[in-house]
Amino acid sequence: MVNTFKMIHTETEKSILKAAKLVFYKKGLAAARMQEIADEANINKAMLHYYFRSKQKLFEAVFLQAFGELAPHLNTIFNSDKPVFEKIRDFVDGYITFVAENPYLPTFIIQEMNINPQFGETFFANHITPDPSVFEKQIAEEIKQGIIRPIDPKQLLLNLISLTAFPFIGKGLVTGILGLDEVAFKTYMEERKKLIPEMIINTIKAS
């Protein structure tokens, strides 16, 4: 399909994109204002509109960059030649490391897709997204080989994604209930890199 989303090329566009990312992450699409983004980028509003005709076009560019950073990372893990247990460890370690460096990314992606499902559908139809199909087939094959207990591959993936993503998506809730400050939260996330894989592996490993 034809790519309908704007790609970023010039230094000015990159500067605008960086500013827009900060504003969108803080306020979301609906509450963000083009003037705020122009001020953050240290340009006037007219120049902002020259490069991006509307807030929607600018948002699409920000979203494309954000998701474009995550999808290839996950696909590299899904498509590797490693056994399932190793992929589980790599997924958890890689995801937590990536999101710790981009803490607003999961909330940003999920929030905007929930608000505008049609945008999400268009985006997925036009861009590289995480494709776990190879991983799912591998899970099914290792079940046949008696390495893994019978489990729906999609349920395994859902468990894997939920356990790694939720603490970041629901960070305010997690830190509030558990009484964690920022340092403690980061420590717990580092511990989960080992805790989650072993918990899942012990659950699905055939006796």
Image: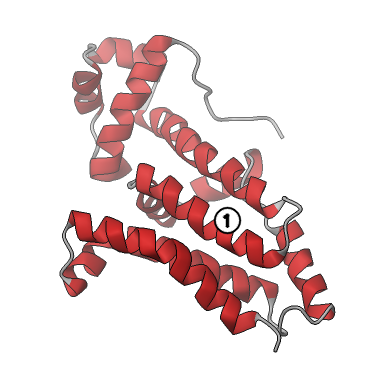
Residue 16 drawn at (x, y percent): 33, 20
Q: Residue at x 52, y 49 (%)?
A: 120
**With 132 as the anchor, is 123 left or right in this view?**
left
Taking depth in this image into account, of 6 and 152 the one nearest to the observer is: 152
Q: Quadrant of residue 86?
A: bottom right
Residue 117 seen in the current view: no
Is 160 drawn above or below residue 57 in the view shown? below
Amino acid under disc 1: Asp
Q: Crowdedness of circle 1 by 10 Å Cα count: few (<14), some, many (20+)?
A: some
Q: Quadrant of residue 71?
A: top right
Q: Residue at x 56, y 57 (%)?
A: 91
Is 102 drawn above or below residue 3 in the view shown? below
Taking depth in this image into account, of 10 and 92 the one nearest to the observer is: 92
Taking depth in this image into account, of 33 and 65 the one nearest to the observer is: 65
Residue 148 drawn at (x, y percent): 72, 79
**With 152 as the anchor, is 173 left or right in this view?**
left
Residue 84 drawn at (x, y percent): 69, 65
Is 54 drawn above or below residue 77 in the view shown? above
Residue under circle 1? 90
Q: Quadrant of residue 48?
A: top left
